[in-house]
Each structure stands twice: as structure tokens, then as C-alpha cells.
Image (cartoon, rainbow, N blue to C red):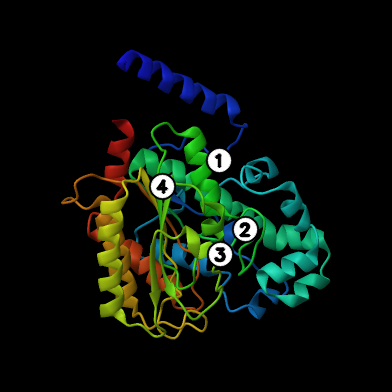
């Protein structure tokens, strides 16, 4: 029986390889690099139009700058992402959806910046969609890194409102879905994933994509009174926590901790994808919650402790993406949270390098 099982596993692994297209998104990364993915080309800026949306489209660069200024990272420490190609994107998206992005008016609707509709599409592709495709590639690359190093971080991504057939809420590509599908198809031993979505908004994109997929367990903690109000997508949430507006630290952290505990008792994932939106911050114009900067740092620490804490029954690889956050100070909070994870020993370059060699 064990011999038959071995043959079946080998056949399944071979089938994975043969059915997968050629891609650069799962390329090998030198052990000298931290499992942190970032490029200065993540940042969006064209003719000031990016300022017409409350999202800070230079947030990602500021996070990296703060980490460099504090001496935690150098330029050559991070992994440079590869842009997701059309063939990569077709693993999740239909050709019809991708073709619709060749119409500037469609992209204007997705990004909620109406003047984008007036721009020639080649400009929209180069200045807006290319950075988003690069971040999407970064999330997929970080997924593989997490399985190799135990953890990984994309300083970007988390486009949780985009599904296979539609974008919205500044999300044009379904990077979370794509990262998970790449892992299922290409990495042996990864067959169950848990999405922990702690952005202030419901993550209706990945929920629509995985609504009938028992391999993916979704925990979503969000403000019940704000966008997107997607009742169909809620059917995919296995652990749903709908918050009251202006929820504060104590109640929020208690709910996150209690539900993480019960989710991991109910489901045993091979990887956790953590959508770490900072739009829960007090004063956020879209999130309408009241979590302090310290509360966000504690929240991220809590999630990593559940995945990688020394007292946990097992270590679960975790991929973190930064997602939403609509205030200028969120970049500093994300950087502070990463520094705290390093200080607590929950992430480290040394541990990552050792795990790679084993």
C-alpha cells in the first residue's frame, strides 16, 4: 500500500510539472537575500492623477525607505520581483477580463479614478497596470519563498477585491488567488491554504475565487458597514468576524486572537496567506475602525505567533502582503511592525538562510 501511495505521489508531482506553463515567478532566490520582495517600480505616479484616490500610491517605497533608514535592510537584501506575464495571469483570469483592461474606462472604474478613462491605454498600462502586475508577481514569488524559508513578505500586493472575472476597489489583478494556485500546482506538499484577511474591508475577490474550494479556508475580519457588501462572496468565509464601526484595540485584538485559535483548530493549512491591511487604523477615511498604531503592530505579531511561535504545535509557512491603508502614516506603521517581528524573533534572515539549507 505504501509503495502504491509513493507511486501515486510521484505521478501527481509529475502531472503538476507537465501541466504548468513556463514562468519566472517561481525562480530560485539566493540564500543571501531576505524573503522580502520589493521594487521601486511598485510605486505609482503619473501627472498627479494618483492623488485623486485616497490610497497612498507611494506607500510601498516609504516602507522600504524607513526600513533602510533604521538599518534593518539594504538595497541588495531584498528580492527583486518579476512582472506577472499574461500567461501567468491566465492561471486565474480569463482572457476576456484581461482584454477588458485594454479599455481605459474599465481601469478607471476599477481604480476609482474617473480621469483615467480619458488617457490613452498605453499610458494606463505603463504607469498604472504595470506596477500592479509587478506587485502581483511579487506576491507569487513570495508564496514560494514562504514555503522555503518559513515566512515571506511582499511590500505590496493584497489586491483582495479582484477575482478571476472582475476587479474593483483599486484591485486589478487577483494576486492572492494567483499565489495560492501557483503553490497548489507547483509546490509538492502544499495542498491546503488559509487566508487570514485583516484588512478593514471584506476580501470579496479571493472569496469569489475559492467559494467552492475546500482546500482554502478563509478567515475574514472586517467592518460590516463599508464596501464591498458582497453577500455572495460571504458564502466562502469559514470564519467570519463582522466588526462594528470604530471598534477599538482591546476588542479587536481579542476577536482576532480567539478566531485565529479556533480557525487553526478547525483547519490545518500548509501555508497561511496574511492580508495585513492597515486601513483599520484610527482616522482612516475608508476603514472606519479605531485601531491604534500599537494595535496594528500587536495584531501582526499575534498572527505571526500563531504561525511561527515557538510554543505552537507546528510551524506554518506564512506569506504577508500589505493591502489597503489610506493615511500617510501607515507606511511608518508597516515598517515598525516589520521591525517588531524581527525584534521578537518571529522573522529573521539567519533563520531563513538555515531553513533553506536543510
Q: Upstream in the sequence, badge 3 or badge 2?
A: 2
Whole-percent x, y for residue 350 in the image: 28, 44
Q: Nearer the viewer, residue 202 or 54?
A: 202
Residue 80 in view here: no
> Which residue is depicted at the point 66% across and 69% down?
111
Q: Nearer the viewer, residue 173 or 331?
A: 173
Q: Which one is closest to the eye, mark 4 or mark 1?
A: 4
Q: Is residue 10 above or below residue 63?
A: above
Q: Nearer the viewer, residue 103 or 95?
A: 95
**Residue holding disc 4:** 193
Does dot 4 land on a helix, a strand or a loop? strand
Q: Upstream in the sequence, badge 2 or badge 1?
A: 1
Asked if marks 2 and 4 touch (Cβ < 8 Å), the reply is no
Which label number is shown at residue 262? none
Cα–Cα span, label 2 and label 1: 15 Å
Whole-percent x, y for residue 171 in the image: 61, 63
Label 2: few (<14), some (14–19) or many (≥20) C-alpha neighbours in 10 Å: many
Cα–Cα span, label 3 and label 2: 26 Å
Judged left or right of residue 125, residue 258 is: left
Q: Upstream in the sequence, badge 3 or badge 1?
A: 1
Residue 29 in view here: yes
Cα–Cα span, label 3 and label 4: 21 Å
Q: Upstream in the sequence, badge 2 or badge 4?
A: 2
**Residue holding disc 3:** 232
Outermost residue, left direction? 311
**Residue holding disc 1:** 25
Does dot 1 land on a helix, a strand or a loop? loop
Amino acid at each position: 500500500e505504501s509503495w502504491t501511495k509513493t507511486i501515486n505521489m510521484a505521478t501527481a508531482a509529475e502531472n503538476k510539472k507537465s501541466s504548468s506553463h513556463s514562468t519566472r515567478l517561481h525562480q530560485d532566490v539566493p540564500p543571501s537575500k531576505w524573503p522580502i520582495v520589493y521594487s521601486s517600480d511598485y510605486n505609482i505616479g503619473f501627472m498627479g492623477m494618483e492623488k485623486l484616490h485616497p490610497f497612498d500610491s507611494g506607500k510601498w517605497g516609504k516602507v522600504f525607505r524607513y526600513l533602510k533608514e533604521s538599518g534593518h535592510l539594504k538595497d541588495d537584501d531584498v528580492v527583486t520581483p518579476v512582472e506577472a506575464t499574461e500567461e501567468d495571469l491566465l492561471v486565474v483570469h480569463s482572457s476576456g477580463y484581461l482584454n477588458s483592461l485594454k479599455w481605459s474606462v474599465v481601469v478607471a472604474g476599477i481604480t476609482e479614478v474617473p480621469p483615467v478613462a480619458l488617457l490613452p491605454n498605453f499610458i494606463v498600462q505603463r504607469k498604472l497596470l504595470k506596477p500592479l502586475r509587478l506587485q502581483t508577481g511579487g506576491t507569487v514569488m513570495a508564496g514560494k519563498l514562504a514555503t522555503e524559508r518559513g515566512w515571506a513578505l511582499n511590500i505590496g500586493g493584497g489586491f483582495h477585491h479582484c477575482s478571476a472575472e472582475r476587479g474593483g476597489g483599486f484591485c486589478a489583478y487577483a494576486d492572492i488567488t494567483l499565489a495560492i494556485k501557483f503553490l497548489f500546482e507547483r509546490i509538492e506538499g502544499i495542498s491546503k491554504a488559509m487566508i487570514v484577511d485583516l484588512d478593514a474591508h471584506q476580501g470579496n475577490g479571493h472569496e469569489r475565487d475559492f467559494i467552492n474550494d475546500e482546500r482554502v479556508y478563509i478567515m475574514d475580519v472586517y467592518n460590516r458597514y463599508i464596501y464591498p457588501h458582497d453577500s455572495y462572496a460571504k458564502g466562502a468565509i469559514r470564519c467570519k468576524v463582522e466588526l462594528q464601526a470604530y471598534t477599538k484595540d482591546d476588542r479587536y485584538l481579542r476577536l482576532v486572537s480567539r478566531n485565529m485559535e479556533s480557525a487553526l483548530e478547525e483547519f490545518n493549512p500548509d501555508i497561511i496567506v496574511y492580508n495585513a491591511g492597515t486601513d483599520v487604523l484610527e482616522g482612516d477615511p475608508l476603514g472606519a475602525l479605531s485601531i491604534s498604531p500599537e494595535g496594528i503592530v500587536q495584531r501582526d505579531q499575534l498572527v505571526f505567533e500563531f504561525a511561527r511561535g515557538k510554543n505552537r504545535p507546528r510551524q506554518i509557512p506564512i506569506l504577508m502582503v500589505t493591502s489597503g491603508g489610506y493615511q500617510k502614516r501607515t507606511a511608518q506603521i508597516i515598517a515598525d511592525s516589520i521591525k517588531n517581528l524581527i525584534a521578537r524573533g518571529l522573522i529573521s534572515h539567519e533563520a531563513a538562510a538555515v531553513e533553506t539549507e536543510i
